Image (cartoon, helix red, strand yellow):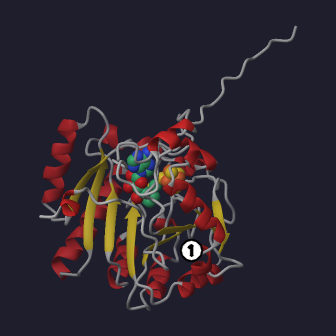
Amino acid sequence: MSLAADRPRPQRNVYAKTPKYVEIETTIMCNAKCWFCPQKNTLRQPKYMEDWLWKKIIDDTRDIGAIYRPFLLNEPFADKRMPEIVRYMKKDPTAQVEFNTNGSMLTQKVADQILDSGVNVMRFSIDGFRKETFDESRGISYDKVYKHVRYFLEQVKSSGAPIHTEVRMIKLPGTEEEQKEFKAYWEQYSPDNIVFTSLYSYPWEGQTESTNLPCVKVKDEMFFYVDGTCTLCCWDSIGRQIVGDAKTENVLDIWNGQEMARCRELLDAGRRDQLELCKRCDAYAHYDFSNWEGFDAKAAAAHKEKTIPVNIVEIT
Ligand SMILES: C[S@@+](CC[C@H](N)C(=O)[O-])C[C@H]1O[C@@H](n2cnc3c(N)ncnc32)[C@H](O)[C@@H]1O
Ligand code: SF4
C-alpha cells in the first residue's frame, strides 16, 4: 500500500450545483410548545405560505432529485394543505418527501391521504414513553399521539407501502430505563428505525463564545421561511443569516449566489465568529476537523470571540 493511501483523507464540504434537501416552512404554526424547541419564539408572518410561493420553490427545484422536507421548526400537519403539497412535490418523479411530525394532528383521515400521496419517509417525534416525560403540558395529548402513530405504522405494515418509518425519542437525562420501555413498545409495530437522539442547543441559547469550527450543516441543505426568505441553517430560529428570497430570486440562483458563497467560505475556514448566526453555535463541537482542507485550527482559535461582560454602573 502506498504512503498516500495511509494518510487520512482531507475532508471538506463538496458543494454541488443543486441542493440535496429543500426544507419549506409552509406554515409557522405548531400545536405544541415543547420546552426544548424555540418554535414558540418565532414571530414570522404570514401564518401560511402563499400557494404561489411554495409552488414556485418546488417548480424552481424540479428534476434535480430533491428531497423535500415541508417543515422547519413548525408542525407540518398544522397545514391542512399538506396532502396537496406532497402530491405537488411528487409530480416530479425524481423527488422524495420526508416528514418529522409530532403526530398529534395526523388523524386517520389525514394519514390516509398522506399514505396515498407517495411520501417516502415519516419520522415521529414521540419524545417519551412515560406520561411525565412526554409532558402533556406542552399542549399535545399522549393518547392521541400514540393512537395516530400506531395507526400509521399498522397501515404501512398491512399495505406494504414503501414508506420508511421511524419513531424517535430525545435522550433526556434519567430516561435510560424508559428508553428500553419505549423500544420494546414500538418494536411491536415494526417501524424501520427506533432512534434515540441527543438534546442539542440552538445557536444563541447559552453559548458565550465562538467555537470557530467549520460546519457540515451547510453542505447540501436549503431552508425557506414562511415568507419565502431563505436562511443558511434550520437552527436559525429568528432569521440571523438570510441568504436570499424565493419571492424575487430563483432558488438555484440563491444556492449558487454570492451570499451563500460568502458563508461557505467563512465556515470552511472555521470563521463562525464572522457570521452573526454562527458565532454562538456549538454544533459539531465534537466532530474531528483536524484534516479539514483549508482549516487552520490555531488561526481560527485566535479569533475566538467572547461575549464581553458588561459593567453595570449604578447611577444614584
Ligand atoms: C423542531 S421539530 C419540527 C417538526 C415537528 N413539529 C416534530 O415535532 O417532529 C423537528 C425535530 O427536532 C427535534 N428537536 C427540537 N428541538 C430539539 C432539541 N433542542 N434537541 C434535540 N432535538 C430537538 C424534535 O424532537 C423533532 O424530532
Ligand atoms: S455553524 Fe451552526 S448555525 Fe451556522 S450553519 Fe452551521 S450549524 Fe447552522
Quarter of the image containing the N terminus?
Answer: bottom left
Residue nearest the observer in this picture, 23 or 184? 23
Which residue is the extreme one toward the right? 316
Crowd rating for badge 1 (residues with CA inside 10 Å; few <14, some 14–19, many 20+): many
Residue 38 % position (x, y): 54, 47
Residue 231 % position (x, y): 60, 62
Seen in the image, is 204 located left or right of residue 249?
A: left
Seen in the image, is 213 located left or right of residue 192?
A: right
Residue 228 seen by the camera = no
When the figure is inspected, residue 263 is found, relative to residue 14, above or below; the finding is above
Q: Amino acid at mark 1?
A: Trp
Quarter where residue 285 is shown: top left
Q: Residue at x 63, y 82 (%)?
A: 250
Quarter of the image containing the C terminus?
Answer: top right
When the figure is inspected, residue 293 is found, relative to residue 177, above or below; the finding is below
Which residue is the extreme one toward the top? 316
When the figure is inspected, residue 130 is found, relative to residue 42, above or below; the finding is above
Quarter where residue 86 is shown: bottom left
Residue where numbered disc 1 is placed:
255
Q: Residue at x 57, y 85 (%)?
A: 60
Q: Residue at x 26, y 76 (%)?
A: 163
Seen in the image, is 79 located left or right of residue 194?
A: right
Residue nearest the observer in this picture, 192 or 153? 192
Circle 1 — which element? helix
